[in-house]
Image (cartoon, rainbow, N blue to C red):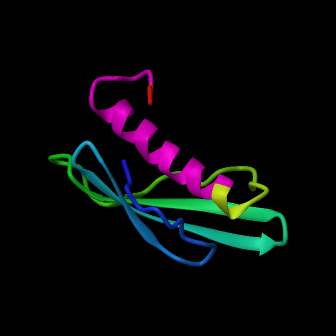
Amino acid sequence: MSTAVDRPVAGEDWVFGYRGCEFLCSVTTTGPNAFWPHVLYRGGLQGTEQVALPPDSDAYGSPQEAHRHAEQQAIRWVHDRSGDGQGRF
């Protein structure tokens, strides 16, 4: 998991690594209480090309919540492709 102490704010990208996979994550905003996580898989699984993970249908109320969800989405994505379809954390 990410070891960064300072969490990025909306508009800043950060790299998140999990089980040998690398993701580029970001949070964008469309208003004072509407924050959207974005996750791009960059590499780590053999035979899997770079791909943007599906966007969320709902915004989150804070950048911290959207940040946390971006990393959780990346973790679930790895689990779904590595034999643990349960998406456990």
Q: Is residue 7 above or below residue 84?
A: below
Residue furthest front as drawn: 5
Answer with left or right where residue 21 lies relative to residue 54.
Answer: left
Residue furthest right as drawn: 32
Instruction: Please give the count of numbered marks on the rendered protein.
Output: 0
Residue 12 position within the rendered picture, expressed as x and y whole percent measured from the top left: 53, 77
Asked whether residue 23 is drawn in magenta, I would say no
Residue 87 position within the rendered picture, expressed as x and y whole percent measured from the top left: 44, 28
Residue furthest bottom as drawn: 11
Residue 39 position within the rendered picture, expressed as x and y whole percent measured from the top left: 48, 59
Asked whether residue 71 is drawn in magenta, I would say yes
Asked where in the image residue 34 lies, by quadrant, the reply is: bottom right
Towards the viewer: 3 or 32: 3
Residue 37 position within the rendered picture, expressed as x and y whole percent measured from the top left: 60, 59
Q: Is residue 87 above or below residue 6?
A: above
Q: Is residue 22 above or below residue 78?
A: below
Answer with left or right where residue 49 lies relative to residue 55.
Answer: left
Q: Which quarter of the image is occupied by the C terminus?
A: top left
Q: Is residue 15 above or below residue 12?
A: above
Answer with left or right where residue 80 lies relative to residue 54.
Answer: left
Towards the viewer: 7 or 40: 7
Residue furthest left as drawn: 46
Residue ID at (71%, 50%): 57
Residue ID at (25%, 42%): 19
Towards the viewer: 18 or 85: 18
Which contiguous range is marked in magenta? Answer: 65-86
Residue ID at (43%, 47%): 74
What secondary structure is the stretch in magenta mostly built from? Answer: helix
